[in-house]
Image (spheres, rainbow, N blue to C red):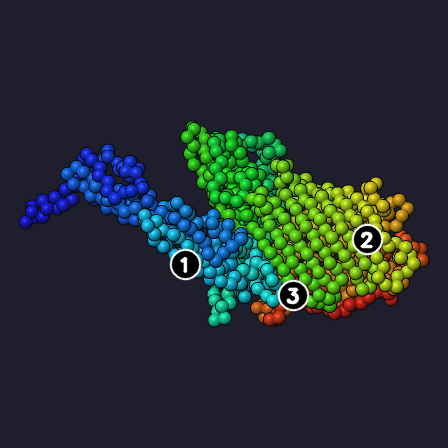
């Protein structure tokens, strides 16, 4: 009995074992038999069920056929096929303009293409992903496949985008440590509100994924080494309002601990190793753990080694936890003794390859250096043009060469914003259009318009971050402004353009030379003095100048320590009706006071504007304090007065001390409270000897509250002047609702 079963089994499993002598193809009309036969491996001697199954799958994978049957009998392999139809007519219904262009690029099934159900499914899924990325989460796609003669079909894709899905609420739950208002400033998604017409409140999966990364980087940069964004989920209530919830686990805060260095392979002088230890000690000793500090350490050590002519080295930084400290283990080793054969960039369908290569520290023919590879990838991620950036190193055909393959996924880079608000100083409407990747060249184009009770302005801005591969930024702006302040007695119109470049001259130190042209028109609107009336009319100015800036903050978002400093000077050139020389100096220092709930800052500013050809400076060059410089006074409500009109001064100095502090307001209202002490003055009137110089120092103190209410964002400031002049215009209470002023 057992022998009989074995014989039957061998017959069933081996009956197909034979050599292919002929291939017979049945059912094909458009697809050439030779094309199908090339898929058959005739070198196989034993034809079994596994071979037949694999061949069937291989033929199916061509997407040419709706049905495939393979059989083998008496040395003849028979392949029976039913061909997929051809698309005769193709139409997309329900979208237009830019959306139609994008969907057309996504869908692969077009006229004269071979139709298959799998292709249609992939196209629909890809289109849904595009619509979701644009905020249309509830969009539906219904394809119509209409059969006609000669094995052809008409294909209609019906798209109903429905309303764009807006985020009504954003919540942060778990052990989050920071307030919701602070975390909202970190992410790019925002809540929808009546004061917003267009904004990033549209629900977008790529943006949410990016937000998770932004949050994690924010926490790590604040010392929370183990922080995890455990999830981000979207919920829909009965009113079709979407809520986005981030689950956060900050864990505990760490400081930097010990630093150790290890040299592998290469020979380094002891004095250079000691210098690296000094660099690390200056940066890390007694400091809160920060990813930015790690990047600075890597950069400074790399620059130091390159300055000492060490070549082809790699740096590996390991972060090791020990109790409440992060110990840094620094390993320097020889770089790989292989060269880069090719750099292949895949996935940049919109962005030019030049934009990516400009941010890479490697090129074909360079030694493969993993430190530079990772830095290159980080640089490209920082551009925020792609939702995904990954890389893979593979062996090249040539010996001792490798291929560097970079994979990117494009994401939307344009945005439209609009908002309105109302406050003590009147109403405001703002709108803007921004494109971060114009023509796929990494160029930033921006237009912003602002209409308020006392000012109308429009600005067009162009920025190329790496002009002509010089590693220098090129920026240009065109602007038009008109202001008519109720306490000035005149209106001033300005139209002009600026051209500048910016580059790093040393770590965190930037230099920006600039030039500009401005046309001014001054008109009298009230009972102005004769002196002020004599200054009405039109003037033309051309200027040249520069700006030095130093940024040592621990973070661009919610800094808790560090400093920002700037120094600028501008001079009107000989092609000017009035030649003025303008100087600005400013600095802000941030420091954690009692604990991280009390973040203090001190901001100082000093400015001067002086004519250099025995003329008086223009009204637009005169200096005025704002409500953020000296709270407790109206904008332009401090300084010299000419016939009841505040005309600004030639000099300005301000100092503002501020500290946040905790409050009992529920976290859901995203509140921030702070105390402040402001001091300053505006003085100097070059066009008259009869007007008081206004040399008295003004000072105010007060409390401020910002929070999100059911009717929109609200801001309240209450100020008490400590010292003032009799001509000053007080504003003890200030409130805003909606957009910021």
Q: Position of residue 238 (x, y in %)?
A: 47, 71
Residue 105 relative to residue 559: left or right:
left
Q: In the image, which is nearer the foreground, mark 1 or mark 2? A: 1
* Residue occupying image coordinates x 85% and y 59%: 524
Instruction: Report which quarter residue 143 is drawn in.
Output: bottom left
Q: Position of residue 724 (x, y in %)?
A: 84, 65
Outermost residue toward the left in this view: 1
Residue beneath label 2, please? Answer: 521
Q: Is residue 518 visible?
A: yes
Q: Position of residue 458 (x, y in %)?
A: 70, 54
Q: In the image, which is nearer the foreground, mark 2 or mark 3? A: 2
Residue beneath label 3, please? Answer: 738
- Looking at the rendered structure, the secondary structure element under dot 1 is strand
Outermost residue toward the front in this view: 149
* Residue occupying image coordinates x 72% and y 51%: 479
Q: Position of residue 12 (x, y in %)?
A: 14, 45
Q: Is residue 234 above or below residue 287?
A: below
Q: Is residue 107 above or below residue 677?
A: above
Outermost residue toward the right in this view: 690
Q: Which mark is residue 142?
A: 1
């Amino acid at each position: 009995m057992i022998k009989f079963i074995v014989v039957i089994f061998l017959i069933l499993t081996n009956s197909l074992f034979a050599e292919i002598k002929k291939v017979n193809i049945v059912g094909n009309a458009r697809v050439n038999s030779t094309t199908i036969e090339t898929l058959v491996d005739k070198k196989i001697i034993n034809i079994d069920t596994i071979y037949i199954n694999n061949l069937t799958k291989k033929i199916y994978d061509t997407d040419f056929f709706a049905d495939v049957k393979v059989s083998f009998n008496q040395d003849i392999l028979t392949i029976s096929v039913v061909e997929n139809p051809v698309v005769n007519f193709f139409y997309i219904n329900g979208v237009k303009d830019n959306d139609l262009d994008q969907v057309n690029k996504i869908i692969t099934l077009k006229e004269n293409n071979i139709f298959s159900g799998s292709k249609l499914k992939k196209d629909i899924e890809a289109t849904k992903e595009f619509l979701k990325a644009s905020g249309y989460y509830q969009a539906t796609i219904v394809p119509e496949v209409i059969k006609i003669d000669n094995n052809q079909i008409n294909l209609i894709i019906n798209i109903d985008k429905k309303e764009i899905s807006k985020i009504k609420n954003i919540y942060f739950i778990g052990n989050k440590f920071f307030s919701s208002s602070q975390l909202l400033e970190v992410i790019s998604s925002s809540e929808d509100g009546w004061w917003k017409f267009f904004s990033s409140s549209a629900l977008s999966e790529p943006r949410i994924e990016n937000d998770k990364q932004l949050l994690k980087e924010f926490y790590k940069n604040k010392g929370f080494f183990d922080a995890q964004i455990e999830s981000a989920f979207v919920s829909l209530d009965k009113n079709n309002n979407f809520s986005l919830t981030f689950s956060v686990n900050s864990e505990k805060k760490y400081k930097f601990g010990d630093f150790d260095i290890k040299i592998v392979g290469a020979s380094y002088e002891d004095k250079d190793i000691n210098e690296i230890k000094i660099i690390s000690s200056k940066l890390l000793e007694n400091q809160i753990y920060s990813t930015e500090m790690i990047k600075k350490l890597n950069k400074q050590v790399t620059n130091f080694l390159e300055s000492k002519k060490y070549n082809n080295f790699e740096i590996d930084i390991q972060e090791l936890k020990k109790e409440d400290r992060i110990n840094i283990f620094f390993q320097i080793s020889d770089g790989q003794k292989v060269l880069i054969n090719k750099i292949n960039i895949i996935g940049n369908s919109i962005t030019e390859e030049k934009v990516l290569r400009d941010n890479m520290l490697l090129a074909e023919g360079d030694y493969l250096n993993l430190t530079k590879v990772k830095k290159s990838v980080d640089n490209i991620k920082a551009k925020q043009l792609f939702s995904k950036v990954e890389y893979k190193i593979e062996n090249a055909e040539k010996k001792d060469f490798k291929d560097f393959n970079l994979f990117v996924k494009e994401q939307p880079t344009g945005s439209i914003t609009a908002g309105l608000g109302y406050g003590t100083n009147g109403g405001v409407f703002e709108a803007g259009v921004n494109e971060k990747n114009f023509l796929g060249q990494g160029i930033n184009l921006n237009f912003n318009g602002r209409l308020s009770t006392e000012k109308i302005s429009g600005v067009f801005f162009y920025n190329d971050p790496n002009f002509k591969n010089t590693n220098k930024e090129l920026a240009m702006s065109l602007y038009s402004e008109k202001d008519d302040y109720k306490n000035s007695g005149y209106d001033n119109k300005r139209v002009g353009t600026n051209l500048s470049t910016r580059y790093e001259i040393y770590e965190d130190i930037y230099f920006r030379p600039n030039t500009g042209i401005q046309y001014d028109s001054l008109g009298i609107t009230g009972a102005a003095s004769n002196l002020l009336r004599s200054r009405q009319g039109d003037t033309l100015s051309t200027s040249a100048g520069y700006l030095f800036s130093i940024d040592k903050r621990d973070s661009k978002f919610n800094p808790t320590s560090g400093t920002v400093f700037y120094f600028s000077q501008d001079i009107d050139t000989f092609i000017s009706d009035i030649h003025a020389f303008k100087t600005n100096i400013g600095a802000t220092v941030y420091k954690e006071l009692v604990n991280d709930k009390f973040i203090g800052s001190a901001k100082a500013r000093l400015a001067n504007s002086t004519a250099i050809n025995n003329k008086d400076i223009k009204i637009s060059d005169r200096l005025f304090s704002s409500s953020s410089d000296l709270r407790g006074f109206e904008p332009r409500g401090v300084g010299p007065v000419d016939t009841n009109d505040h005309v600004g001064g030639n000099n300005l100095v301000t100092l503002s001390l501020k500290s946040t502090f905790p409050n009992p307001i529920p976290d859901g209202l995203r509140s921030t409270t702070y105390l402040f002490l402001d001091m300053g003055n505006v003085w100097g009137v070059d066009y008259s000897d009869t007007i008081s110089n206004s040399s008295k120092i003004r000072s105010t103190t007060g409390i401020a509250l910002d929070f999100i209410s059911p009717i929109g964002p609200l801001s309240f400031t209450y100020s008490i002047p400590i010292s003032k002049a009799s001509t000053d215009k007080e504003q003890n209470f200030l409130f805003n609702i909606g957009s910021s002023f």
